[in-house]
Amino acid sequence: PADIKARLAASWQRHGTRLMAMKAVAIDNYDLATFGWDTPVDDQGDCGSCHIFSGMGSLDSALLKAHHGTPDKSLLSKQHVMDCANTGDCNGGWPEDTIAFCKKVGVATLEEYGPYRGRSFNCKSTTSMKLLKVADYGYVGREDGVPTAQAIKDSLVKFGAISVAVAADNAFMNYKAGTVFRGNGRGINHAVLLVGWKTESKKTIWKMKNSWGTSWGDG
C-alpha cells in the first residue's frame, strides 16, 4: 500500500521493544504442522482473495497456538471478511487490512457465518453474532523490505504463521512437488503464509503455504 512506511512505523512503535527482546532461535528444522498449529490447505478458487486467506491464515495459526480450535479446519469465517470488511475482494487487497478489520470489528466463526463461497455477497452479520477480535498484530521488522531470516524465524516460533507476499509469475504457478522452488520474479502480487523452514547446506528453505488447493506444489 502507498502508506506502507507509516504502517511499519506504527507497528514498530507498538511492538519494537518486544521484537528486539525476543530470543534468537537456533533450530535447523521447524514446522507448525508438527505441533498442530496449522490448518489444511485452502482453495481460493477463481477469485483474487489471497489477501484474505493469508491474513486469516495467520490468525488461525495464532488461535491454535493459544489452544482455540482444531487443526483439521479453520475456526474463522473467511466469507464473513469477504462480505463485510470492504477491505478488498476478488480483485485483490492487502492482508493487513483483513487483520485490521478483525481487530476493529471482529470476525465470525466458520460455524456461525458459513464457509467460503468464492466471491463476495451482501453482509449477513447480525448483532447476535459472536465476533472474535484480534488484540493486536504487527510487522516483522521496521523497514520497507524483507526482514532478516533470523527475525522471521524468531517471530514464526513466537507467534505462528506469518503472512508474506511473493511474486506469482509463470515459474511459480507451474511449480510442482519434489524440488525446492528457486524463482527470480520481482513483481510482488500474491499473499501466502510462511509455516516453517528447514536448513540444507547452511541455507534456509522456507515452507510456504498457498491457497490454490492441494493440486498445486507439494499438496
Image (cartoon, rainbow, N blue to C red):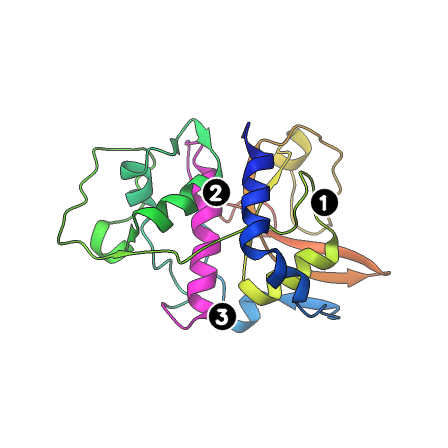
Q: Is residue 8 toward the left or the right of residue 212 in the image?
A: right
Residue shown at the point (56%, 71%) measured from the top left: 34
Tell me which corner region of the image, top left, top right, bottom left or bottom right, holds residue 124: top left
Q: Which residues are magenta?
A: 43-69
Q: Residues within 10 Å of mark 2 (few under 14, many from 20)?
A: many
Q: Is residue 31 above or below residue 168?
A: below
Residue shown at the point (13%, 54%) measured from the top left: 128
Q: Secondary structure at mark 1?
A: loop
| Furthest-right residue in this view | 201
Residue 109 is situated, as x and y percent measured from the top left of the image, at 28, 56
- Real-space Cα separation, disc 1 to disc 3, in angstroms: 25 Å
Q: Which residue is mark 2?
A: 96
Q: Is residue 46 magenta?
A: yes
Residue 31 is situated, as x and y percent measured from the top left of the image, at 61, 65
Q: Amino acid at mark 3?
A: Gly
Q: Is residue 9 above or below residue 138?
A: above
Q: Which mark is residue 181?
A: 1
Dot placed on the residue nearer the N-terminal end, 2 or 1 = 2
- Position of the N terminus, as image quadrant, is top right
Residue shown at the point (62%, 52%) measured from the top left: 140
Q: Which residue is mark 3?
A: 36
Q: Residues within 10 Å of mark 3 (few under 14, many from 20)?
A: some
Q: Is residue 198 magenta?
A: no
